[in-house]
Each structure stands twice: as C-alpha cells, then as structure tokens.
Image (cartoon, rainbow, N blue to C red):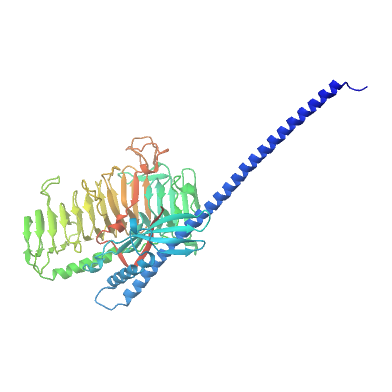
Amino acid sequence: MSNPPQQNESHRLEWNNEEGAALVIALLAVVLMTIMGMVLLEVLRGGAVQAVSTEAGIQAEAIAQKGLDDTLAQIRRAVAAGETNGDALQNSKTRYRNRINEVESQLSSILTAFDDEIGTGSKAGNGKVVRANRGSYRIDILSVETVNPEAANKPITYPDFPYVRKFVIQSVGTIDSHPGRTVTKQMTAYVSTINPVFRYPVSSGGDLKLNGTPYVVGDVIVRGNSLHVRNEAMFVGASGTKFGVQTGLPALRGFIRVNGDGTTADENKKYTLQTDIETTSADVMEPNYFTPLYFPLEDPKLDFDTMVDVGAYVADKLEKSNQRLTGNFGEKHLDEVDYEVTNATKSTSILYTNMWVAYQGRVTVDPGASAGDGDVFVNNGTLTMFDPSSARSDDDPVLSLRRGSLYVRSTDPNLVAGDFRGEISIDEDKFVAVQGNVSLNNGFKFMQGTMYIDGDLKIIGDITLQGTVYVNGNVELKEMRSINKPDAGQTNKIPLIIIASGEIVLGNNTNENNANDQIRAFLYSQQGLKLYGVLSRLKLTGGVHGEDEVELNAVRGELTGGSIVNEYEGRWNGSVPEPQINLPADRSRLQIIYDNALYDQPPAGIPTMNDFNVFAKDIQYK
C-alpha cells in the first residue's frame, strides 16, 4: 500500500533540511581547519624565524668576541715585540725602562690598524671592519690611557715605577642573515708591569679555607691544590681558646683557579665541603659549596702571581742607608739627650747620632735652589713625632722633606725606632727607611711615597697612607675603623699596600659597613693569613694574600644573639651573632672587594716586574 502524497512530501522536506545542516557543519569544519592550519603555520614560521634569529644572535656574539680576542692577541704581539726590542738596546737606561719605552712605542703604532679615530661620540663607529665567517666585526678603540705616563722619565727607584696602559675596546659583530643581527661587546684591557697578585682580592700561595660566610667580589687564585669550604665560622677567644658558630656558606662573585693540574698524585686538585653532618671531598667543585647564586666558575687561564721578595727590597734600602751615612750632611748633632725640635725650617740635610729626637709642630727641610738634598738621618737613636694633644688639630706634627728621604736606625730591638704621628710629606721618588720597630698612630698621614721597615710595624687607629709599606717583620693593626677614608667632598684616596715577611694580624677592629668608613688596603704576607668577621666586622676594599695558607672566617648580621656557639675549648660568655638563616650575602661581617684603583691609580712602590702582563679586566654587552 503506497504512502499518501502529503507524507512523501514531508519526508523530502526533512531530508533536505538535514542535508543543508550537514553542509553548514562541513563548511564550518573546513573554515575552522583552515584557521587552525594558518595559526599552526604562523607558529611554525614564527618558531623558524625565532630559531634563525637566535642562531644569528649567537653567531653575531661569537663574531663580536672574535673581534675582542683578535685585538687582544695583536696587543700581546706588540708587547712581546717591545720587550724583545728593549732587551736589544745598549744604552744607559735599565732593562726595565728600555722595555717600557719600546712597548709604549709598539702599542702606539698598532692602534691605527684597528681604528683611525680613537674616542667616543662622533669618533665612534669609524673602526676598521674585518670579515669573518658569515659576517664581520668592527673594532672601535673608545679610549687609551697611559696611567703613569712619566714613569720612564722619573728617577729610578726599587721597585721602579709601574707602567700601566689601559684600553677600552668595543667590538660590533654582525651576521649576514635574514634577518641580520648585530651584537656589541666592550672590553677593558690592561698592559702592565704590576705584579699580577694585585688583580685578585683573595689569593693564596698555599691552600684556601673559607669558613662560614665570607663575601668576596673579584677573582680568586689558589696556588695550592686545595679549596676547603666549611659552614662554620671559627674565632678565637681572649685566652686563645677556640670557638665556632654554625652559619651558611661563602659567596664569591668572580672566577676562581686552583693550581692542581693532575700530573702527579700530590698535585691533584681537591675540593672539600665540611658541614655539621658530613665531610665530602672531590676533584671537581660543586655548586653546593657556595651560597646559591654566588657559585664561581673555574677559569684555568687566570695568571698566577709572582712572589714578592720583601727582604730584598728592605735590604736595598738598608744598603742605601749605609751609603748615605758616609756622605755629607749640612747639619750634625751628636749625643744630645732628649733633643726636641719645634716649628723649624731647615735648608740643608741633618744627621742626628746617638740621640732620641722629638719633632713637634711643623718641621720643614727644603734645600731650595741649592744642589743638596733634604735628607734627615737619625743614626743609633729614635725619632718621635710628638703630639701634645690626643685629638687632631692644626698643631699636629708635620715633617716635610723636599728632595729628601727619612732614615732612622736603632740598634735596640726593644725600642720603637720610629713613633710617628701627624704627617710625613716627601717627594714621590723618595722614601722612609727605618731599621727598627715602627708605630703609626691614629690620624697619621703619608700622602705619597714608600716606607721600608726592618722590624715590626704596629698601626694603631685610623690612618691615611697612600703608598706601599715593606716590612721585614710582623704587622699588627688594632683599634682601626678606616684606612684612607676620603675627606669630606673629596674622591676616594689611593689604596695602601702592606707587604710583610712575617704575620699580619688584625685585632680589635670594627668597620661598621658605613659608606664613610673605608679600609682601602691590600695586605700581603709571606706567611699564612687568617681574617675574622665573627665578633669584629671588616669590610676591605683591596685584597689579601698569604704566601702560605689563607683562612677566612665570617658570619652574617649583627651581634644581637640567637646563634649557638660551639665551645671547642673553654666556655664562651661574650656576644653572639643573630640567627644565620636566610641572611643575604652582603651582610657578611667579612667582605673583601677588589679595588680597581690598584691599576687605575697604582700606589707608589707597588711591586713591579720586568715582564709585562696583558689581561682583560671585564667584558660587557652594550
């Protein structure tokens, strides 16, 4: 039986509606798939472009670095040629002076090979372009400065004046790609005769121990084979008893090199981490040895220092003392007991023999236009710069020598041969030579020059000493808050360098981490060296070196109590640091920060070498 016509028509309408809906859905699906495909293609294209751009950036950076490396290599070759040429010269100058002249000449001659116009601003961007693999680099010499340009013409001293030439070099690396990329890197490089030890805030001729949380900014060199890290800071009580405070780990912002080269069993590197739980050792340094974010990378190319022969430098000045004693003096005094000089002006050299001499007020020795010198010599006696008041004033003693050096010789090892207060002023190429013990008292100033001491040195209180002190003996610094603190409104002073054959001991010193309190000094000992920032606080801008083992001990924060003191010997009833958990690295009570002024403004008498060293101080992206 057939369906009625109306029913058939209804079925046809339903089928048509379903077919139309399916078509719409299919079209929507096609559109959606197309959009998704286009989005996917754009993502893939963007990823490909990003990958190309990233690769181009890496290659451009590599080309920029190649430009810096090539430039540094050219500088090294010029220095080597200058050293060779200087050694071949036969004249009245010393080998050291000849080398300086020839190196300076070679360096000046190669600059135009890189850049026709040296400088910034309109002079930048004019450097030579050098083709490299898939790109090129352009070298711009932004600045060149000879830090001590008169060094080769000054009177010869021992050690002689340092030579430093500073380059600021910019390399622009460009990669030939689509899209192209450009990366700019800037390097500060030095050519110098200064002993490389002054490039490092911490260096050790033996092993290095970092106990607790010392904070070091700059590169570290260890000529020994062992780096020992411990999460406990040690300190010593008044009676020599030993105590410890559990704390965190050290923080180092810089590179490190440990000497062991693995050629023999006893020269292998050894890294040790000692905690309250266990002690582990390995031949590689692990990140957990240091505070997070302060893990130093190893750089096997860091230059090792050369040992400073303190005894030889001091002996040279003692010999010069002997020679000077046989010479002529315009004024002589003999066997006058307790001889006092107040506010005097002399025009000739002076010799005191078998006398205890006291200077008060302003004493000046100035030979003027005469051919003589302004030397002062105390032979077989002592010199005291007398200050009638305990506070600094205009009455503080000032000894000013023009064209003269100061010689003091005492035969009694129990006496203080030189007891100095106030200020000693000499010409840059002159010196103070003391055979006997020396005391530098609070407020003492020595604005330029070099001291040589055959005896012990004691520094009491805050001083300003812009030069180098060689001590053939021990050094003690006590009751000190600052060294070379800048005067109000003045720029930073040149750092002090102390180089001792014996121990350097810092006792009862507190630097309160105040921007106005500075200890700007480099302390060098031919013995071991131990520094503490547990009960005391020490922020040192400069560096430390111990020819034997170096040990740094530190906690963080204030002495507000809360930490547990481990009593290894005796009982501790004194101050205690605050709890050490989560304290930042820069709150360490022992901070040693590299001082650029050691190369940019080298102190008179800084140890130098005949061989030049070339190194890159820092490299930055611009």
Where, by quadrant of the figure, is residue 407 drawn? bottom left
Nearer the observer, 554 or 564: 554
Q: In this picture, is 69 found above or below 444?
A: below
Q: In this picture, is 81 found above or below 230?
A: below
Where, by quadrant of the figure, is residue 414 drawn? bottom left
Q: Relative to 414, is 343 on the left or the right?
A: left
Q: Can you name the residue that lies furthest to the front here? A: 5
Nearer the observer, 480 or 233: 480
For the question of whether residue 205 can be seen, the reply is no
Image coordinates for residue 269, horizontal then vertical, percent: 47, 58
Image coordinates for residue 12, horizontal then vertical, percent: 81, 26
Which residue appears at 50% of the width and 52% of the height? 281
Q: In this picture, is 474 found above or below 156?
A: above
Q: Can you name the residue that lies furthest to the bottom here? A: 90
Q: Looking at the figure, which quarter contains the N terminus?
A: top right
Q: In this picture, is 328 found above or below 62?
A: below
Where, by quadrant of the figure, is residue 355 drawn? bottom left
Q: Can you name the residue that lies furthest to the right here? A: 1
Total tally of numbered discs in the picture:
0
Q: Relative to 334, is 50 on the left or the right?
A: right
Image coordinates for residue 487, horizontal then vertical, percent: 21, 47
For the question of whether residue 182 can be seen, the reply is yes
Image coordinates for residue 589, horizontal then vertical, percent: 34, 43
Q: Relative to 125, is 366 on the left or the right?
A: left
Nearer the observer, 121 or 467: 121
Nearer the observer, 85 or 181: 181
